Amino acid sequence: MSNIESILTETRLFQPNEKVKQTVAIDEDTLAAMRAKAEQDNVGFWSDLAKEKLSWTKPFTVGLDESEAPFFKWFTDGELNVSYNCIDRHLATKSDKNAIIFEGDQGGVETYTYKELHDQVCRFANTLTAQGVEKGDRVVIYMPMIPQAVFAMQACARIGAIHSVVFGGFSAEALRDRIEDAGAKMVITANASLRGGKTIPLKDAVDEALEKGCDHVKKVIVYRRTDLDVPMQEGRDMDWMEAEAGMSNYHDPVPVNAEHPLFLLYTSGSTGKPKGVQHSSGGYLLNAHLTNEWMFDLKDDDVFWCTADVGWITGHSYVAYGPLSVGATTVIFEGVPTYPDAGRFWQVCEDHNVTVFYTAPTAIRALMKFGADLPNKYDLSKLRLLGTVGEPINPEAWMWYHDVIGRGECPIIDTWWQTETGAHMIAPFPVTPLKPGSCTQPLPGIDAAILDEEGNELGRGEGGLLVIKKPWPSMIRNVWGQPERYKSTYFPLENVPYYVVGDSAYQDEDGYFWILGRVDDVLNVSGHRLGTMEIESALVAHEKVAEAAVVGRPHDVKGEAVAAFVVLNVDIPKGAERDALIQELRNWVAKEIGPIAKPDDIRFGTNLPKTRSGKIMRRLLRTIAKGEEITQDTSTLEDPSILEQFQK
Ligand code: WT7
């Protein structure tokens, strides 16, 4: 049964148990009161929370400024510093509490108290300033999943520099696009990263990215994670430790306007190159803070582990900023779930007494395959809440997570959100009754609805476009340097300034939301967003490729796999030569974008299935990719014989 079918037939309901009800900070009554307040006065609801939860150097008087809608602004006349909010304000009461517990790929553990984090971040903030980075400058961070990545992010926030973290798995080409688009002045990297016992060079990719253009990059700071020797370019490259030597442990955080961009994060869309999603300082931090309290109920003695890399939005809101803003202890893990064996996640949970664990359905499905014996070998009794994010979770994986990892006692917090939303949007509180596969209900203050193609609001039970009707504090502020693209991508509806998500969904009779998937040409591979067009452009850039069409096909671990249909400008090779070309094209895509975008499946044909007007019939390609029989009408096809070629 496909995920969607199993979701559509799911009827189980799980009530929170007594222990959860009695221990969580937000009980049913508090939640109901919050919803009522948000309903009555949305802007007042968020404004009161912004005053209560964040420290402002200059208090704001304006809640929401809609004068330039859909460019919404929140708390616009207020000033704050995000790093101060994540670190300094906890020092009076928590200076000796662990802020970060780090476990390396090879198992080495390091801890940083809030005081130690403060000193590290201050030293690096002073280093950035000494190297000429100023408020508003863009800094690209291309790092392994190590504490230094968070120090670098926090140091940027401390001086008002705008960081853009690029996932370490992206290629030199993809890195160059992002460095150029952001106009970065500095790149912060490491000589290499360590994953699953393998050394993956990072500095090499930076050198390659900076070979052409990128004259705006003046400095590269290199952290030595391994003993791999890397060439350093005189005058441009600096060793992290050397650059930091002699820097003071004190740095006065620079107050910025609430709307000052905290970071850019590039993400794929259905058209063009990845977009630089621009987030604010005040509004972003508010929702990152609140959702760590609301969804994960983080308290003083919790140890929170979000497995996401800081290269994704999840690693921003639930590793680098949110947990620190609430003063929690957060785990940073460098390795992979299956090294040295598939019990690693559970070993990390046991060793560090993890109480709240947050991961992706793809990881759960991958680990589920190893059976319950592995997790059962570890003491997971400290776990009290389990989160999931990245794609709809199939009820089977949900049940395994709930029963095997959570002993049937931990609520499963299925959080629906996006890079653009900054923080959770539709998700249960720990006391919310749960249905496996549903992300349940919008958070208080979030006004979600489902529309038909004409923009009419649909009733319960009807599938359509998911939209958010009211602005919220952590929403995307702009597409970096492309305001028109911001408007046309996210606010395409005439007459109404609703944020259009790009997912389809429906609401059941209880008002619970069920996400069905993307409505655009965006794939979700292992919880990572990939634009089909990006992969097609990468393929077409290969000298032997004339045309390419990319679609997704269901995959039992990754959720979706990449299937590419390719037309060559040479004869289609046979046998071993064909296999070699497939391998070459897969590696080519890895080089152009990154290994995550490698097609799982490449098929050759003499043309793509097109209508007489030249439109590629992707629906047909999806059917072929799934290995299903074609039942669609193919009479509009220019050349129906093409289909046979692709059917392998
Ligand atoms: C897309 C956003 C949010 C951080 C990770 C991905 C899908 C995300 C869920 C969920 C169903 C989900 C959506 C969304 N998605 N979480 N809990 N249930 N679908 O961020 O790369 O910006 O991707 O991921 O399709 O639009 P992203």
Image (cartoon, rainbow, N blue to C red):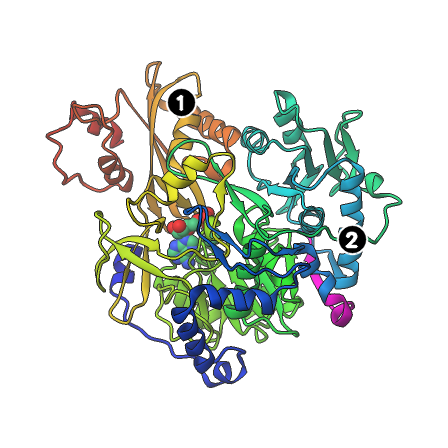
The boundaries of the magenta stretch are 90-104
Q: Which residue is mark 1?
A: 540
Mark 1 C-beta to ligand 1 under 8 Å: no
Is residue 347 visible in this depiction of the protein? no
**Relative to 74, is 179 above or below?**
above
What secondary structure is marked by label 1?
Answer: helix
Residue plotted at (56% across, 39% down): 169
- Comparing 35 with 27, the one in front is 35
Q: Residues within 10 Å of mark 1 (few under 14, many from 20)?
A: many
- Give amino acid for label 2: Asp
Residue plotted at (60% across, 42% down): 165
What secondary structure is marked by label 2?
Answer: loop
Q: Which residue is mark 2?
A: 252
Q: Quadrant of the rendered structure where residue 530 is?
A: top left
The quadrant of the rendering that contains the N terminus is bottom left
Left or right of residue 350, residue 294 in this image:
left
